[in-house]
């Protein structure tokens, strides 16, 4: 099932330091590596300088709407009712979702598509360092691993011997 993504919706769900069209492309490419799917991402407005209006990145196509709205471009991609039924539209925009649903396309929110249920993407969140040990914890560990006298008999009290088969 081909997927059309409202690129600006996806952009605004990313954490602030990662809000760029390049990060959206990376997130989509990363998601497409895990799932075998054909994806078209549509951004509002013109492409950045030196970038074509249509980029083909393997199974991912990135479109820039230029003077049209991205919503109109996505609806145009869906085509007629028969072909739209094979598409899934990823957006948080209720207006676009209603228009796509009228055509017969299935709708998913950005969080549903990214596999998140109201949480941040693991790839984009910072790893929190563990807090340092408190002085009493350090003392406990030092005591536990300090050199102690070994018992004089290093041999185990019982030796395991497998049963013989008859």
Image: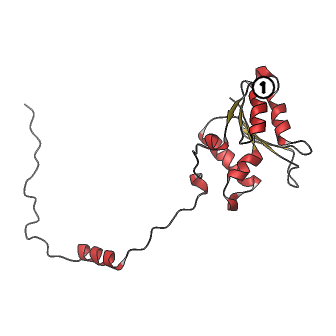
Q: Which residue is drawn at the image coordinates 69% and 60% (left, top)?
A: 16
Q: Farthest right residue?
A: 67
Q: Quadrant of residue 140?
A: bottom left
Q: Position of residue 156 (x, y in %)?
A: 10, 59
Q: Quadrant where the C terminus lies?
A: top left
Judge by depth and name the residue closer to the eye, 161 or 125.
125
Instruction: Tell me, yes or no, if residue 107 can be seen here.
Output: yes
Q: Is residue 127 left or right of residue 81?
A: left
Identify the image quadrant of residue 100.
top right
Left/right placement of residue 51 relative to residue 116 reads right
Q: Residue furthest top?
A: 82
Q: Is residue 160 above or below residue 17?
A: above
Q: Nearer the viewer, residue 149 or 92?
A: 92
Task: Identify the coloring.
Answer: secondary structure
The residue positioned 84% from the left and 47% from the top of the image is: 44
User: Which residue sits at x=56%, y=53%?
Assistant: 122
Work out which quarter of the rendered image holds the N terminus and state it: top right
The answer to whether residue 25 is visible is no
For residue 137, above or below residue 162: below
Residue 72 in the image, given as x and y percentages of width and height: 85, 36
Q: Is residue 147 left or right of residue 52?
A: left
Q: Position of residue 22 (x, y in %)?
A: 74, 54
**For the point 49% across and 67% down, which residue is it?**
129
Q: Position of residue 124 (x, y in %)?
A: 61, 56
Residue labelled with disc 1? 103
- Circle 1 sits in a helix, a strand or a loop, which is it? helix
Mark 1 neighbour class, 10 Å CA radius: few under 14, some 14 to 19, many 20 or more = some
Does residue 68 lie above or below 144 as drawn? above
């Amino acid at each position: 099932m081909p997927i059309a993504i409202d690129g600006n919706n996806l952009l605004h769900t990313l954490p602030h330091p990662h809000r760029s069209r390049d990060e959206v492309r990376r997130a989509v490419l990363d998601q497409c590596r895990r799932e075998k799917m054909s994806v078209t991402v549509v951004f509002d407005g013109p492409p950045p300088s030196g970038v074509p209006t249509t980029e083909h990145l393997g199974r991912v196509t990135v479109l820039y709407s230029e003077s049209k709205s991205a919503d109109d471009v996505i609806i145009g991609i869906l085509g007629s009712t028969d072909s739209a039924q094979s598409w899934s539209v990823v957006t948080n925009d209720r207006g676009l979702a209603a228009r796509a649903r009228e055509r017969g396309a299935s709708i998913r929110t950005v969080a549903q598509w990214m596999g998140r249920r109201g949480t941040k993407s693991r790839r984009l969140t910072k790893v929190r360092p563990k807090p340092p040990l408190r002085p009493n914890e350090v003392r406990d560990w030092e005591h536990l691993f300090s050199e102690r006298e070994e018992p004089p008999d290093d041999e185990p009290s019982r030796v395991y011997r497998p049963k013989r088969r008859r």
